[in-house]
Amino acid sequence: MSFADPAYRAANRANWDERVAIHRANRPGGYRIAEFLAGDDRLHPIEDEELGPVDGARLLHLQCHFGLDTLRLARRGATVTGVDFSPAAIAEARALAARVGLEDARFVESDVYAAAETVEGRFDIVYTTWGVICWLPDLDAWAKVIAAKLAPGGRFYFAEGHPFMLMLEEVDGRLVPTYPQDTPADRPLVFDTAQTYTGDPTPLNQTRTYEWIHSISRLLTALDRAGLAVDWLHEHTEVPWSPFPMCVPTEAGMYRLPPEQPPLPLALSLSARLRSGS
Ligand SMILES: C[S@@+](CC[C@H](N)C(=O)[O-])C[C@H]1O[C@@H](n2cnc3c(N)ncnc32)[C@H](O)[C@@H]1O
């Protein structure tokens, strides 16, 4: 098992605890909570197209935040368990589950690196999406947790910001390579961000976060070493948040580069299975 330096982890967790309170306030541009409460079970277009039916599946959602997507998957018939290290996120997820009558949904407060021990049982689908591995220093340890929690024949579904996009910053209207690929585990990128990413102006107190960029080769190698065989990997020119000020919204609520830019990859997704004998 491997954990981030406790100081990095503590700062990131405090930052996430604060963001939960802001995200659950449901201001415009944020998490579509009103639609969720009205019965909506839509994910983003990428997962909606790729995930396939989850009806009847035991599904483990890693880094579930306050459970909106976990509960959407429960509405589609999955038996869900959400895991997140933020106590505020888990408390809100449980409250939301009770509010919409999905009391069978389970939520576990745990570091993702400890989930092999803290979460009981094995799952038909392990699911984790959007803004997850940037918080994790060690993808080998992460992939081992996924392999440990998959039942024989089970499937891993993953969608995330593309590392190529994460290496760029917009400076004076141009995209500039700024960060190296493959941040070392013990030397995270340090960011100070005054507000959360939804556009809500509420100031954060815990502004400092520690984050990691992982190349596609590091990701695929970690999955392979853990005994997971990738069925497919897709790269996308849209992502659920606006990564650069120049990005434009799509009709489906995603963001893409403006037409004058080449359509660079902004997101990736993949599906993998345990190799037999793993
Ligand atoms: C961008 S959010 C993921 C949102 C997700 N796409 C969803 O379903 O809404 C990232 C989440 O990762 C969680 N997180 C960050 N580091 C973690 C760790 N080491 N173990 C468990 N959860 C972690 C945060 O608390 C946060 O809820």
Image (spheres, rainbow, N blue to C red):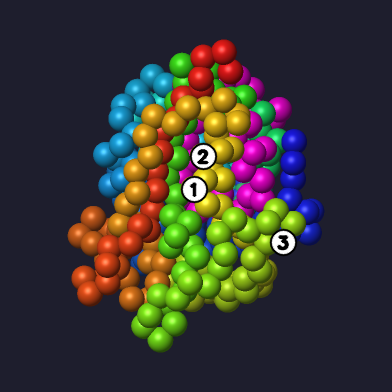
* Quadrant position of residue 56: top left
Question: Which residue is under mark 3?
Answer: 187
Disc 3 crowd, CA 10 A, few/some/many (<14, 14-19, 20+): few
Look at the numbered discs 2 and 1 and tell me whether their residues touch, using CB distance below 8 Å. yes
Residue depicted at 44% across the width and 55% down the height: 161
Report the Cα–Cα distance between label 3 and label 1: 19 Å
Which secondary structure lies at badge 3?
loop
Report the Cα–Cα distance between label 3 and label 2: 21 Å
Quadrant where the C terminus sits is top right
Residue 79, image x, y percentages: 46, 25
Question: Which residue is under mark 1?
Answer: 216
Q: Is residue 145 magenta?
A: yes
Is residue 38 found left or right of 162 in the rendered image? left
Is residue 41 found left or right of 11 in the rendered image? left
* Quadrant position of residue 251: bottom left
Which mark, residue 225?
Answer: none
Q: From which residue to which does the magenta span run?
A: 117-146
The answer to which of 68 and 96 lies nearer the viewer is 68
Residue depicted at 39% across the width and 43% down the height: 269
Which mark, residue 220?
Answer: 2
Disc 1 residue type (three-letter): Ile
Residue 263 higher or lower than 92, as above or below: below
Disc 2 crowd, CA 10 A, few/some/many (<14, 14-19, 20+): some
* Pair 3/2: label in front: 2
Disc 3 residue type (three-letter): Arg
The answer to which of 69 and 166 lies nearer the viewer is 166
Disc 1 crowd, CA 10 A, few/some/many (<14, 14-19, 20+): some
Which secondary structure lies at badge 2?
helix
Residue 107 higher or lower than 35, as above or below: above
Which secondary structure lies at badge 1?
helix
